[in-house]
């Protein structure tokens, strides 16, 4: 299956650029990132907090079928402009990764299509390289496929 989510990682840099075009109007793509019920569905996680505003916060928790927490992430929303951008930090509990800074930019392509561009900045080149060794690209592509599938039905 083709990966529609593209990840660009230039040598010697501390960031990644992630792009994905969606067969969704801009407003629905943005809603999929700010509506707690929709986020929970496409990310397969529990949304404990999602304050969509400047200086807001977010907190997600994912459990296994037995109820054991396997993933806990949180951050602060530094900038929020409806249907345009979200700037936030991302930090996972109980892992050796430093917090990262994420810039999400939403762009209208046509009335029925839109584009998400994410720039993720890591503490160091080494931290970015550690992230890239994980099944990060495959998981992100699968999550974006679910996002498009779920939101198309709205």
Image: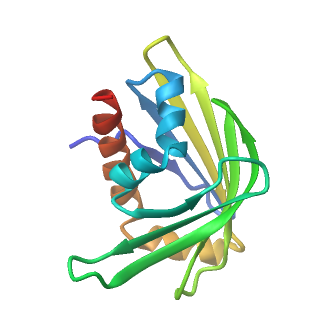
Q: In which quarter of the image is the C terminus?
A: top left
Q: Residue at x 30, y 44 (%)?
A: 146
Looking at the rendered structure, the number of numbered marks drawn on it comes to: 0
Q: Is residue 90 in sight in this rendering?
A: no
Q: Is residue 82 above or below residue 71?
A: above
Locate residue 83: give its quadrant: top right
Q: Which residue is drawn at 20% across and 43% down?
A: 1
Q: Is residue 33 in sight in this rendering?
A: yes
Relative horizontal placement of residue 134, taking residue 9 as reference (left or right): left
Q: Is residue 80 above or below residue 89?
A: above
Q: Which residue is drawn at 64% across and 57% down?
A: 120
Q: Where is residue 3 in the image (x, y as percent from the top left)?
A: 32, 44
Q: Residue at x 43, y 15 (%)?
A: 112
Q: Where is residue 105 in the image (x, y as percent from the top left)?
A: 64, 37
Q: Which of 115 and 12 is in front in this view?
A: 115
Q: In this view, does 59 lie above or below 111?
A: below
| Extreme residue toward the top, this view | 111
Q: Where is residue 144 in the image (x, y as percent from the top left)?
A: 38, 45
Relative horizontal placement of residue 27, taking residue 14 as reference (left or right): left
Q: Position of residue 142 (x, y in %)?
A: 31, 51
Locate residue 100: give its quadrant: bottom right
Q: Nearer the viewer, residue 93 or 129?
A: 93
Q: Which of 32 and 120 is in front in this view?
A: 32
Q: In this view, does 82 lie above or below 113?
A: below
Relative horizontal placement of residue 141, taking residue 76 as reference (left or right): left
């Amino acid at each position: 299956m083709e990966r529609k989510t593209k990840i660009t990682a230039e040598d010697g840099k501390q960031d990644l650029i992630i792009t994905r075009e969606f067969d969704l109007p801009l407003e629905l793509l943005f809603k999929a990132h700010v509506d707690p019920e929709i986020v929970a569905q496409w990310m397969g996680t529990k949304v404990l907090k999602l304050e969509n505003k400047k200086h807001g916060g977010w907190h997600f928790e994912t459990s296994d079928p037995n109820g054991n927490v396997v993933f806990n992430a949180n951050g602060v929303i530094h900038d929020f402009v409806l249907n345009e951008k979200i700037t936030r930090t991302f930090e996972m509990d109980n892992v050796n990764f430093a917090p990262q800074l994420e810039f999400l930019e939403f762009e209208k392509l046509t009335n029925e299509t839109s584009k998400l561009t994410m720039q993720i900045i890591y503490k160091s080149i080494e931290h970015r390289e550690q992230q890239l060794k994980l099944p990060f690209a495959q998981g992100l592509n699968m999550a974006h496929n679910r996002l498009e599938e779920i939101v198309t039905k709205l």
